Image: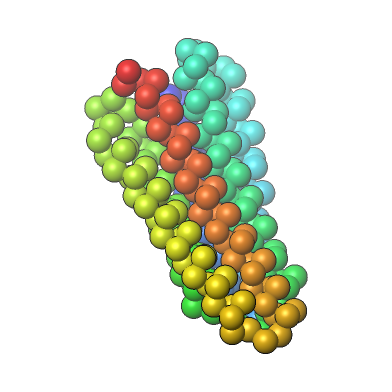
Amino acid sequence: MEKLKPTLVRQADVLCEGASLLCVINDAEAASWKSIFTEIRAKEHLGDALLTEFREISAKCYLQPGVRRELSAVAMAIDDAMDVIKDSANALTIYSPSKIDEPLKNLVRIVHEQALAIAAIIPHMERIKGDATEIIHQADRITELERDADEVYEQYIGYIFANEPDLREMTKYKNLAELYEKATDSCKHVADCVRILLMRFVH
């Protein structure tokens, strides 16, 4: 785990940076979207490289088979979350909605908070037994945030169906909300993978 920790930490940092940029792009003027998306795409490419690095280091480390599998699941889940963030930003540039409603911004803020919680977990994984309480606390926080996102998403979908007269714009908002909500799900999946890993050490 000691040799893998720096790569996992960097993966989590890149996820936070990508989530932060997703907040930025949703607060920015449309003229800036493509350039900000380019930054997010670069983060996603870096995440891919870090996952490859993780696999190469893992292959050279002595780890129990189950531990190797569960650690790899965490690394892949972080990478998947970064992929969804990139896809979300890309969709924004493609759909080019006439406005970005506050619930959409709330969803990406939740993604960012989840990413910060993931980054808070990773340093504790080297002492996974001793730091189990803090790991569980952060994992629970990620799950709670995902539930908050579900509520925001459901209320927003109801709102746009009731109040948005332009079908094309409504479709854009709906699709963006689905992607942003998917990003919160992908962050929760990281927490779920961490919990499975923790169970292997604690039980």
Q: Quadrant for residue 50, please give it.
A: top right
Q: Which image quadrant is residue 30 in?
A: bottom right
Residue drawn at (55%, 65%) of the image: 22
Q: Residue at x 40, y 48 (%)?
A: 143
Q: Which quadrant, please, contains the N terminus?
A: top left
Residue 131: percent from left, percent from top: 26, 32
Q: Position of residue 55 (x, y in %)?
A: 60, 27
How did the renderer colour the structure? Answer: rainbow
Write the residue at 45% across / 63% down.
151
Residue 2 visible at all: no
Residue 94 or residue 5, whichever sits in front: 94
Is residue 73 depicted above or below 66 in this figure? below
Identify the image quadrant of residue 124: top left
**On the picture, is 203 further left or further right than 151?**
left
- Residue 35: give x, y in percent of width and height: 67, 71
Taking 33 as reference, is 56 above or below it?
A: above
> Percent from the top left, x then y, of residue 36?
63, 69
> Measured along the vertical axis of the image, is residue 75 above or below residue 130?
below
Looking at the figure, which quarter contains the C terminus? top left
Q: Residue furthest bottom?
A: 165
- Total numbered badges shown on the rendered structure: 0
Q: Can residue 185 be seen in this snapshot?
A: yes
Most foreground residue, 31 or 6: 31
Question: Which residue of the protein is positioned furthest toward the front in this rendering?
Answer: 162
Q: Residue at x 52, y 65 (%)?
A: 153
